Amino acid sequence: MEEERTLEEELARLEEVVTDLEDGSLSLEELFVLYEEGVGLVKSCSGKIDTVEKKMLQIDREGKLSEMA
């Protein structure tokens, strides 16, 4: 089973994918495979960012939820 990558690792890989897509030296099939990987990375990063945003909520002294600034 593959270990889950951190947000930073996924963003770094996404940058590599974008660079490779922009390079122009890949076949259409290779471009499609990289595009699919990139879409998956964007979805995964978005989910991880959503999780972090939810964790930023904290309970204040009265027991109410408030967002951290």
Image: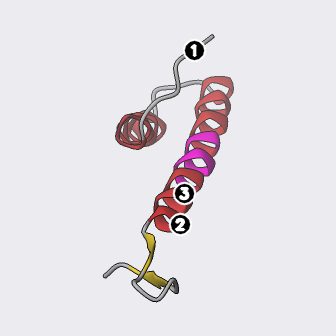
Q: Earlier in the sequence, mark 2 or mark 1?
A: 1
Q: Quadrant of the N terminus?
A: top right
Is residue 44 located in the magenta-colored stretch of the structure? yes
How many angstroms separate mark 3 from mark 2 (CA)? 5 Å
Res 69 → quadrant: bottom left
Residue receiving disc 2: 54
* Residue type indicated by callout 1: Glu
Front residue of 9/28: it is: 9
Q: Which residue is mark 3?
A: 51
Amino acid carrying label 3: it is Thr
Q: CA distance from mark 2 to mark 1?
A: 26 Å
Q: Can you say whether 23 is above or below 62 in the image?
A: above
Q: Residue at x 60, y 32 (%)?
A: 31
- Whole-percent x and y of residue 33? 65, 28
Circle on res. 52? none
- Per the image, label 1 sits on a secondary structure element best described as loop
Region rendered in magenta: 40-46
34 sits to left or right of 5: right
Residue at the location (36% across, 78% down)? 68
Residue 24, image x and y in percent?
A: 46, 35
Label 1 crowd (10 A; few <14 / some 14-19 / many >=20): few
Q: Is residue 12 magenta?
A: no
Q: Position of residue 28 (x, y in %)?
A: 65, 30
Residue type, mark 2 in image:
Lys
Q: Say which residue appears at 58% left-offset and 31% top-offset.
A: 34
CA separation in Å, label 3 and label 1: 21 Å
